[in-house]
Amino acid sequence: MQFVLASQSPARLALLRSAGLDPAVFVSGVDEDAVAASLTDPSPSELVAALAAAKAEAVLDQVAAVHPDAVVVACDSMLNIGGRMVGKPGDPDTARRRWAAMAGTSGELLTGHAVVRLDGGTRAKETSGWEATTVRFGTPSAAEIDAYVASGEPLQVAGGFTIDGLGGWFVEGLDGGHTSVIGISLPLTRRLLAEVGVSVVDLWRPPAS
């Protein structure tokens, strides 16, 4: 059975590879803003779960044509900061303003997960879940924020920060799962895989000879 990651995130792919998997990558291209706009007053967890489900759905036909026996995993992360859900900053000015507001505070990073199992090219089982982790931000100086924004790293990541890259210098601590903050919770993914009848250990790459 092929493990499929429905995401273009290099951090998610690197994490899964370091955890023994060899994912095939299919990028959904889902319009996240359109999906969010179609929902009626969703809770933070409902929002990230719906976005993850939309990403999984978007790649199913492509995956089935290439890997008829597969398990597709999609994720979406957003930061709840001050009661407001924010995704990728997208541009330097937004990233700089966001960091000025986040510095010295805490936020809740929510990651939605959707899992679909294909058997013989047909959707057999599916499930979903989400995880929340509290992130305690440090207080970088204005010069440090400018340097971080200039690196380009925070522009295309949920909440405008990472913990496994340059952003890790400005995160004081986490209360919850650190892999969820990277973008895909390994413990939650293992449980969701089990719900669709897949054991993660059966997906591990064989050891190199």
Image: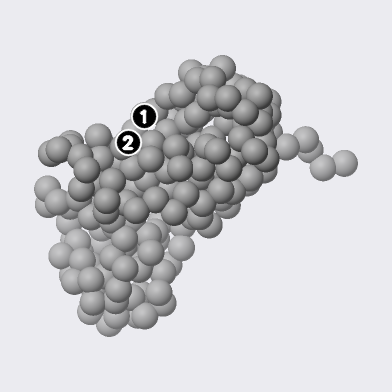
In the picture provided, is 130 more to the left or to the right than 197?
A: left
In the picture provided, is 72 more to the left or to the right than 143?
A: right
Q: Nearer the viewer, residue 58 or 135?
A: 58
Residue beneath the point at 12% across and 48% down: 83
Q: Nearer the viewer, residue 135 or 31?
A: 31
Query: x%, y% of residue 57?
Result: 44, 37
Residue 184 shows in the view: no
In the picture provided, is 35 more to the left or to the right than 192?
A: left
Q: In the image, is residue 153 above or below residue 107?
A: below
Q: CA distance from mark 2 to mark 1?
A: 7 Å
Residue 59 shows in the view: yes
Residue denoted by label 2: 49
Query: x%, y% of residue 26?
Result: 56, 48
Which image quarter holds the N terminus?
top right
Nearer mark to the viewer, of 2 and 1: 2
Mark 1 surroundings: few (<14), some (14-19) or many (≥20) residues within 10 A:
many
Dot 1 lies on which element? strand
Query: x%, y% of residue 158?
Result: 33, 56
Q: In the image, is residue 114 above or below residue 144?
A: above
Which image quarter holds the C terminus?
top right
Q: Of the residues shown, which amino acid type is indicated by label 1?
A: Gly
Mark 2 surroundings: few (<14), some (14-19) or many (≥20) residues within 10 A:
many
Residue beneath the point at 37% across and 45% down: 76
Mark 1 and mark 2 in contact (Cβ < 8 Å)?
yes
Residue beneath the point at 32% across and 51% down: 32
Q: Nearer the viewer, residue 47 or 186?
A: 47
User: What is the quadrant of residue 93 in the picture?
Assistant: bottom left
Query: x%, y% of residue 113?
Result: 40, 36
Q: In the image, is residue 83 above or below residue 71?
A: below
Q: Earlier in the sequence, mark 2 or mark 1?
A: 2
Disc ID at residue 129: 1
